[in-house]
Every structure is written in structure tokens, then in C-alpha cells.
Image (cartoon, helix red, strand yellow):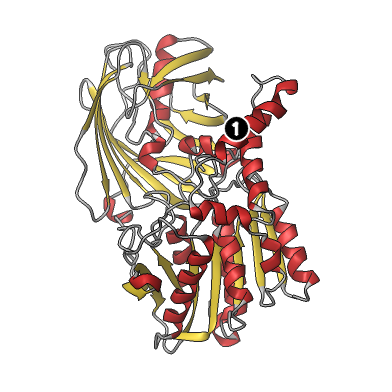
Amino acid sequence: MRTLVCNALVSLISWGYGLGQSAPPIPTTPGAAVCPPSVFVTLEQGKVAAVDWVDYPPTHVHSRTVVNQSQVVDATIEVRPDATASRSSVVLKVAGNEPQKPLTRDLGEGAIYWSPRITSSLEQAVVRARILNQSSSKIPAASLYSDTRTEVNVNRIDSSNWEVSYQEKKYLVLTDQQGCMQAATLPDFGVVIERHADFSPGQYPLWPPYSAPPDGAYRAVDVHIPAAGKAVLAGTLTIPFRKGRVPAVLLITGLSKHERNNGDAPWMPFRDISDALTRAGIAALRVDDRGVGQSTGDQSNWTIFDKADDARAEVAWLRSQARIDGRRIALIGYSEGGLIAPMVAAKDPLIAAVITLSGPGVSGKEVARYQVEQPILRDSSIADADRPKEIANQLNEALKDLTPHESSFLSVDPLEYDRQVHCPSLIIQGGTDATVPVRSAERIANAMRTAGNVDVTVLVFPGVSHSLLPDQAGLPRGWASLPSFLVEPSLLVALADWSADRLLPRAVRSKR
């Protein structure tokens, strides 16, 4: 089902994040900035999410960006005297891996280079606007990864304050009198960008996606878990440096085929979640899906019920580990995983807690319809009278050629399993989720409470989409240009605090 994107996540490269841009100093052109080598630090609610080291040799710009400590983008862009870009060369690398081959592109005529994931491209847009010397400029912008061109709008507020708009995002940019960017904010996303004269790579060290963090806060162990059909499921177990047995959580992925981080670097929600939990004193296990990454096995006839069995095998493995307290194991399910977690807990009374992240509280068919409806209902080019027909046509197309896994997902009533969950449960939902209906959260909670569960908490995070990132629009097609890299920080804090309250002994909680 091509459009059933219940947690269908694409890699950052295919998103065309456009990593590696910066601002060209063009001293030969009136109005252009002559900016010193600088570092732009991106913070999300005070936490460093990316760092862009920028240098400005004559005739080109060199940018080295590290995003979420895991993806490195080394970009060199040739610029003309009018601040438009002519050619680019980009090398991508994931920490711990070999760099990819350089991607070289001719950027054509009349456009700046632009990428919303590289903060120095904001400075580039302002430099071009200063040269154009208009109160409002519509500036063509070229991608570093494809032939795509877009448009960036720059409004001059005064000589040092600018508003840079791209799609539905507005950056408030502060420059000095020469046009060099000093800071920028993206209020709707909680993003702050600050210029630093010095910020060493050692202050933001690389972190391979499956390794322990550079600060050594906890251990990370590669594991291999036997499962049905002679499959071996590979994963990462992160363990706090605390004496004795510790509680643990199992993270369960969404509907599409996923490796253990549930997304490619730098968008790695399961690593963000595991990091938050393990720092709170709780071990976390995240696993490549059967037949994905380092896991063996076949998904050709795999169903949601088989995936639940793999989760049960992972729980059994956790209980067999000497460092894990088998009486304090919780399940965290994202998207489809938010259905599988209750499926597993319904038959396992020893599960200590269940957390659903954007889990479905309606049938799979309703999820599919919701996903098809959302972009159509927001598309102003479609007449109101034509919307029902367009929804029906696209839904029919989406439900063709389903895999056994997709078919089984559509067949399940999630509330049937939610009613059988009697352990403490936390239901988390993003307020702008356009993939799973937002009403799912209270439907899941109500089903649990009606069946007698007295410890059910619902948290809805405004402005957060199915991606678990700040995202006012919420549609998956817009995830490519999101300026955030980390799972919503306040969501991570709430998840870690709730989990610690339910899984850690009182004496340990008091030391946090």
C-alpha cells in the first residue's frame, strides 16, 4: 500500500535536506557581506542539534555540517560575484562509516544554493537580498541534490533584521551592518541559531548511530536474538552504569521496514528515546526488523501477528539477561508499534508498562482513509465538490497490491487489544499528526479505562507531527524541509519522567 505511511519514513538524503550551505562573501559586489569564518550552532529548546562550520575562500563557500552528531555533510559551492551559485560538490557521511562518493552538480543560472537543513544558507539568502537591494525579494534557490528549484522570500525589516520565508516556515534573522548573520530564530519550531566565533569539533563529537554516546553516560551492546523461522534479530541494548538489575524497555517500530533507530541518520527517533531513557536509569532495546539491516529472516509473508511474535521473542530475551529485572519490562510502540505493544501486553500479564507513540486508536482502514484525506482536504487547487471523488480514487489506489503485513494491519481492531491492557499506560500523540488520527489517543485511553485500567495517562503535544518533530503542517510530504532534527525535547522529558516513576525504585528515583 504505497500511500499507507503509518510511520513510513524516508532517509534524510532522499528528503533532500540540502545539507551543506553557507553564505558567500562577495567583496567585489556592492552590498555583499565579507564575513569571517564562523560556526552556526542550531539549538532545539537549548539542546545542540547541529553545528555548521563555514569558511569563505575566494569565489566559493566551504561548509562542514554535523547533524545530530551522526551525519556529516561536507559541501563546497562555487559562487558568482552576484551571490548566485554555479556549481556544488557535496560529500555525505554517517559517523562510523566511509564517506559516500562526492555528488557534484551544475546549479544553473540565477539561483542561490539553498537547503533548510544547513543554517548558513539563511545568511546566503540575506546576502543575495542585500545585493538585490529591495524591501522584499523572491529569490530562486537551487537544491544540491536534484534539479529541483524552489523560491525563498526575504523581507527587509531594517538594516539588520530580516524575515526569510521558505514554504510555511519563517526565520527571523539578525545580521550585523555588513550582512553577516549573527542569529536566527524559528519560533514555531523552537529552533534558535547562533553564530559563534569558535566552536571546536570536540564540543560536538561524532556519534555512530548504534554506539554508546561520546560522553560515556552508559554502555551500548550489540545483541542477536533468536526468533521464529530460524531468524536472528540484531539490535542494540543500552545499559546504565548502575549496580544491580535494572528495568528495561523494548522499542517496537512502525509499519514500514525499519532498522533499529526507526529512521536514518540524522533523524533517529529510537536513538533519541533510548538515550533519554538510559540516562534516566532504564535499559533500552531497539532491534532491526526481520530481514532488515543486520537481522535475518523473511518478510514476504510476514504479518502484524508475526511481528508481535518477534516482539515477544525480544521480551523473552530481555528477561533472560542477568542485568535486566524481568518484572520491570515496558513496551514502547511507535505508530503500528503502538498497536503491537498492546497486542503483546494483552497476553503477557508480567509486562510492567505500555507506552504508545502516535499509535492507532481506529481501524487500519480508517488510518488509510485519514492519510489519504489530509493532503486532499488541504489542497486549495481541488474544488470542494471534487474532494470526495478524489479521496475515493486515491484510497482505492492505496489499497491495491497490499503486502500480507499491510493487509493484516488493516484487519485489526486496536481497541480489542487496548481493552486487555491493565498495566500502567502512557498514550502520546502529536497534535498535528496527519498520519494517524489525533482522536486515537483518547480512544486508546478510553478503551483501557473502560476495562478497568486505573493508571492511564494521555499527553498530546501541540505542534508535533507523526514524525515526533515540531511540525505545524504535519503532512509527511513536508518532513523533507523540517528544520528540527531531534525528537521534540519536551516529549522526551515527559516520556523519561513517566517511565522512571513507574519502573524505577523510589530510592533510585530520588537520586535522579
- State the residue at coordinates (32%, 37%): 38
- The answer to whether residue 91 is left or right of residue 324 is left
Q: Quadrant of residue 409?
A: bottom right
- The answer to whether residue 468 is left or right of residue 377 is left
Q: Quadrant of residue 29?
A: top left
Q: Nearer the viewer, residue 176 or 365?
A: 365
Q: Amino acid at mark 1?
A: Gln
Q: Give the x, y percent position of residue 364.
A: 63, 51
The relative height of residue 189 versus residue 230 in the rendered view (above or below) is above
The relative height of residue 433 versus residue 115 in the rendered view (above or below) is below
- State the residue at coordinates (62%, 82%): 349
> Which residue lies under the disc numbered 1?
394
Q: Nearer the viewer, residue 396 or 447?
A: 396
- State the residue at coordinates (39%, 73%): 227
Q: How many residues crowd mark 1 within 10 Å: few (<14), some (14–19), many (20+)? A: some
Q: Give the x, y percent position of residue 272.
A: 45, 59
